[in-house]
Image (cartoon, rainbow, N blue to C red):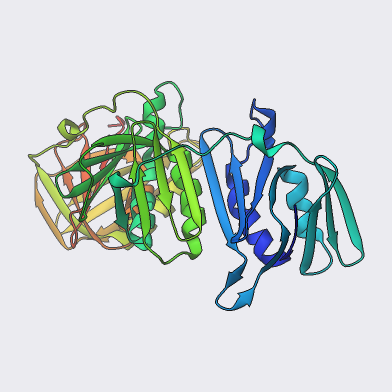
Amino acid sequence: MKFDIMRDHLLAGLNDVMKAVSSKTTIPILTGIKLDVTNEGLNLTGSDADITIQKFIPAEENGEQIMNITTTGSIVLQARMFNEIVRKLPTNDVEIEVTNGFATDIRSGKSEFHLIGLDASEYPLLPEVSAEQQFSIPTDLLKSIIRETVFAVSASESRPVLTGVNWKIQEDELICVATDSHRLASRKTKLEHLPIGVSSVVIPGKSLNELNKILEDSTNPVQIVMTNQQVLFKTEDVLFFSRLLEGNYPDTSRLIPEDFKTNVTINGKALLQAIDRASLLAREDRNNVVRFETLEENAVEISSNSPEIGKVQEQIQVEALDGEALKISFSAKYMMEALKAIDGQDVIIQFTGAMRPFILRSVLDDSILQLILPVRTY
């Protein structure tokens, strides 16, 4: 195998596939990155057995020659070392050649590295998925769905299924739900040509966070294939496979209250900033709790009290307030993350009582729903 390639293209590809490589893997070959050179270009593959990312670098793109291929072939190179070497090469022209066995030479300018590679045939094959169950989603919409739900997954492995986001297909709607049993984030999206074979999967939160980083610069639609064991996200030049979490995701629909005693419509940005200020005093406290109280004449009070530090209180005018008077306490962190997911729009907060879960929605768009359980302080 022998080819030369522009260093910046190689580095960009490595940046993507390195997101799947873990130093903690129990399978030694997965500490490496697989290079597959064909006449069309270079495929880079990285995997930790849970996530597999493959990036394709074409030999030619928009009339620009990115690679010159002398002979095709495959090799696995130690990921961290190969990435560091490419990052520090002196020129933008890189030549890579596999000579006797798996010995690999990397040349750039007057610099030459010799690495001992591994047999590419030992590297796990990509999972087989059928394209029949494929549907398409705009990249910016997929990134919004991830941003609006993934923060609410559980960080605890005691219930592994809650460390993922439940993607459910119901007729023409994709419903994505995350919960850690103290709060819940839900996003509904109407899409065309949704598959009928697989109706519910749980995608690890870690996988969705890594996918989001890869989609940063992408604008083309993402093709999604869901199976019972894997989900595949395909862009023009990246294949992103993730294993799914096993177990039954809890039925969260019955957690969402339908009758409300107090409704508050308020500017989301103003509320977020007030809670951020109140949490300055609550931050030292383990629970980071702030209090929320309705007042007369369309106002609410946000306050926090720390016996060692002091207290803070702030009043905010609201756009509408109806129903019973209310005092409630909640985690500042949970409330701020919910408000960030709704992204600064006016929100309606609906309460069913001081110790019952409450929900937040955007006034403009009811496809996003956030639910938070209060904290007992009063």
Q: Position of residue 266 (x, y in %)?
A: 22, 59
Q: Position of residue 189 (x, y in %)?
A: 22, 53
Kindly identify the residue that appears in the image at 18 percent across and 49 percent down.
173
269 w.r.t. 185: above or below: below
Residue lying at the far right of the rendered structure: 110
Tell me: 1 left or right of 289.
Answer: right
Q: Position of residue 122 (x, y in %)?
A: 66, 32
Front residue (pair 156, 38): 38
Tell me: 330 left or right of 305.
Answer: left
The image quadrant of residue 254 is top left
Residue lying at the far bottom of the rendered structure: 63
Kindly identify the residue that appears in the image at 43 percent across and 47 percent down.
279
Tell me: 13 left or right of 360.
Answer: right
Numbered marks: total: 0
Q: Note whether residue 28 is visible.
A: yes
Front residue (pair 285, 348): 348
The quadrant of the picture occupied by the C terminus is: top left
Front residue (pair 67, 215): 67
Kindly identify the residue that appears in the image at 29 percent across and 29 percent down.
376
Q: Note whether residue 340 is visible.
A: no
67 w.r.t. 73: above or below: below
107 w.r.t. 36: above or below: below
Q: Position of residue 262 (x, y in %)?
A: 12, 45
Tell me: 322 left or right of 338.
Answer: left
Kindly identify the residue that appears in the image at 20 percent across and 35 percent down.
354
